[in-house]
């Protein structure tokens, strides 16, 4: 075990490039995924140079985010996640720089963020809102039948995870927000007027909470109960704003100074500042026989996709009309 950790640490040191594979940027954040953002911030807090690779091929995969270095890969769904892997292998461990800080305090703080606050965020993202935020993060690159089905499935899974039914929905909502209020209050007391949560230098608890709070303040709407609760605590909001500027700089730049490469598409060229882009008019031409066949096959392909979705739902014993009960998002925009 020790030799494996030493080999992984050596691989990390020898790797010319470290690559964080995350979901795409949105809402002024370099990655809009609530799971990817804390990993990115952890690497930034540790001052690790890395590139970002955007993956849009697996919108519902739980192995994203992951970090590639040399021949090694640290997946989100293995060994407690990317941050825990980097700590266990003694590759990047912010907590080791705090001998005076009680590990139990750090662990309990992380538990509040990863349970009470994560539950509240999942509740707002998949149950309360109209689904447009989740659509922009996970499903906007997919054909609408697949995106709509995956969104419905994820919303159903979140309800099951939180124990929400039609009979107890109101009670569960109050319980979720009550725990979130308690967590924000406790974090506000822990932070006080410090720059970090513990001992004025970062731990993984800072990365977890900062990722959560950045997403809440940047992505959730003004009417969000969770966002409004967080904004009550001025020191927590100041904490987020301070580190957003320090770690992200120009938040419109998804790469944070590092290159960002999408996995499924090439970025469109943008017009330079002060210039507007006007496409040249194209002469209308008659479609060839091959083009007509291609368009006809495309229609058949989309129809086959829709049929496959309906067959999938029928095998699960689900009425397709249920897809319209939980969200009002339109995937055809």
Image (cartoon, rainbow, N blue to C red):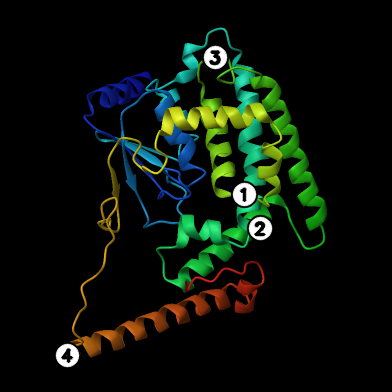
Of residue 284 and residue 172, the one placed in the foreground of this image is 284
What distance separates the C-alpha of mark 2 from that of mark 1?
A: 8 Å
Of residue 126 and residue 266, the one placed in the foreground of this image is 266
Residue 84 in view (yes/no): yes
Residue pointed to by mark 2: 127
Mark 1 and mark 4 in contact (Cβ < 8 Å)?
no
**Can you say which quadrant of the picture contains the N terminus?**
top left
Q: Earlier in the sequence, mark 2 or mark 4?
A: 2
What residue is shown at x 49% (from left), y 28% (from top)? 243
What distance separates the C-alpha of mark 4 from that of mark 3?
A: 68 Å
Residue pointed to by mark 3: 200
What distance separates the C-alpha of mark 2 from that of mark 3?
A: 37 Å
What distance separates the C-alpha of mark 3 from that of mark 1?
A: 30 Å
The correct choice, above or below, for 194 with respect to 26 in the image is above
Which numbered dot is residue 122?
A: 1
Rendered image quadrant of residue 278: bottom left
What distance separates the C-alpha of mark 2 from that of mark 4?
A: 47 Å
Which residue in the rendered view is the most extreme toward the front?
274
Q: Secondary structure at mark 4?
A: loop
Residue pointed to by mark 4: 288
């Amino acid at each position: 075990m020790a030799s494996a950790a030493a080999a992984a640490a050596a691989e990390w040191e020898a790797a010319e490039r470290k690559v964080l594979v995350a979901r795409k940027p949105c809402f002024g954040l370099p990655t809009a995924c609530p799971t990817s953002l804390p990993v990115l911030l952890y690497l930034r807090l540790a001052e690790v140079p890395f590139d970002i690779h955007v993956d849009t091929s697996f919108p519902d995969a739980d192995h994203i985010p992951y970090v590639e270095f040399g021949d090694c890969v640290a997946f989100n769904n293995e060994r407690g996640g990317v941050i825990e892997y980097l700590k266990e292998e003694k590759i990047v461990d912010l907590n080791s720089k705090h001998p005076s800080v009680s590990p139990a305090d750090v662990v309990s703080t992380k538990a509040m963020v990863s349970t009470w606050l994560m539950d509240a965020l999942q509740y707002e993202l998949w149950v309360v809102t109209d689904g447009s935020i989740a659509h922009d993060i996970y499903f906007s690159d997919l054909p609408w039948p697949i995106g709509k089905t995956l969104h419905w499935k994820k919303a159903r899974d979140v309800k099951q995870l939180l124990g929400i039914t039609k009979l107890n929905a109101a009670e569960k909502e109050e319980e979720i927000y009550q725990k979130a209020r308690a967590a924000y209050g406790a974090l506000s007391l822990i932070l006080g007027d410090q720059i970090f949560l513990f001992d004025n230098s970062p731990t993984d608890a800072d990365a977890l909470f900062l990722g959560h709070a950045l997403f809440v303040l940047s992505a959730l709407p003004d009417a969000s109960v969770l966002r409004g609760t967080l904004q009550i605590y001025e020191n927590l909001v100041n904490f987020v704003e301070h580190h957003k500027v320090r770690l992200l700089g120009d938040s419109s730049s998804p790469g944070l100074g590092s290159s960002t490469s999408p996995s499924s598409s090439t970025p469109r060229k943008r017009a330079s500042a002060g210039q507007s882009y006007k496409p040249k008019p194209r002469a209308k031409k008659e479609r060839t026989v091959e083009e007509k066949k291609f368009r006809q096959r495309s229609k058949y392909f989309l129809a086959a996709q829709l049929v496959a979705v309906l067959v999938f739902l029928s095998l699960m014993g689900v009425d397709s009309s249920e897809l319209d009960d939980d969200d009002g998002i339109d995937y055809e925009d």
